[in-house]
Each structure stands twice: as structure tokens, then as C-alpha cells.
Amino acid sequence: MSEPRFLTGPDGLRVEAVTLDDADLIYAQARHSDARAGQSWFLITRYGRLVAYCRDIEEVAEHVDLAALQGPGDASQDAG
């Protein structure tokens, strides 16, 4: 089984690495006309709703406090 490819943050935030397929491509091209199928991008959602598609971590940082992100299993480690 592969490792999860996402990070979580406060208030339902999720940042996931995705490979653009046809469905993702439509949304990514809405902001970045040069997006192409097969490229790796970051998908940002909040409570399952689209926030943004970002091509690099610097662009993710425009939407999210990177220091607030954690891996899917990190919450239990912070409690100890």
C-alpha cells in the first residue's frame, strides 16, 4: 500500500498531491491555462470543497499557512 499523499490543517483543510486527469484539468486550467494532463499539482480543499490547484509549494503558501499542516497521523504525536 502506498503512503498517503496529503497533509491536513485546521478547519477541514487538506493539501493533496495529485496527477492531473481530465476532471482535475478543467479546474486547474481555470486558473492556469498551461496546465496539462499528467502533471503533478497540489489540490487544496476545505471540508471537501475546492480551494485551489497549485503547481508548486510557493503557490500553496499563498493559500495556506504551511506551518499549520501535518501528516494524516501526526495529530496523535502532538498530544504526547
Image (spheres, rainbow, N blue to C red):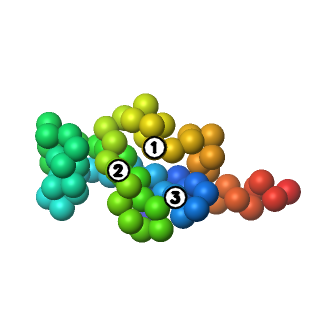
Q: Residue 61: image x %, image y %?
A: 48, 37
Give the CA distance from mark 2 to mark 3: 11 Å
Q: What element carries label 1?
A: loop
Q: Which residue was labeled with disc 3?
A: 13
Q: Name the residue under label 1.
A: 63
Whether residue 15 is visible here, answered yes or no, is yes
Q: Reading the chain from its start, which is encountered first: label 2 or label 3?
A: 3
Q: Quadrant of residue 21?
A: bottom left
Q: Nearer the viewer, residue 76 or 31?
A: 31
**Which class describes the residues within 10 Å of circle 2: few (<14), some (14-19), or many (20+)?**
some
Instruction: Check disc 3 and give the amino acid type.
Output: Leu
First in sequence: mark 3 vs mark 1: 3
Q: Is residue 67 left or right of residue 56?
A: right
The residue lying furthest to the top in this view is 58
Q: What element carries label 3?
A: strand
Q: How crowded is mark 1: few (under 14 residues within 10 Å), some or many (20 or more)?
A: few
Q: Which amino acid does the dot numbered 2 rest on?
A: Ala
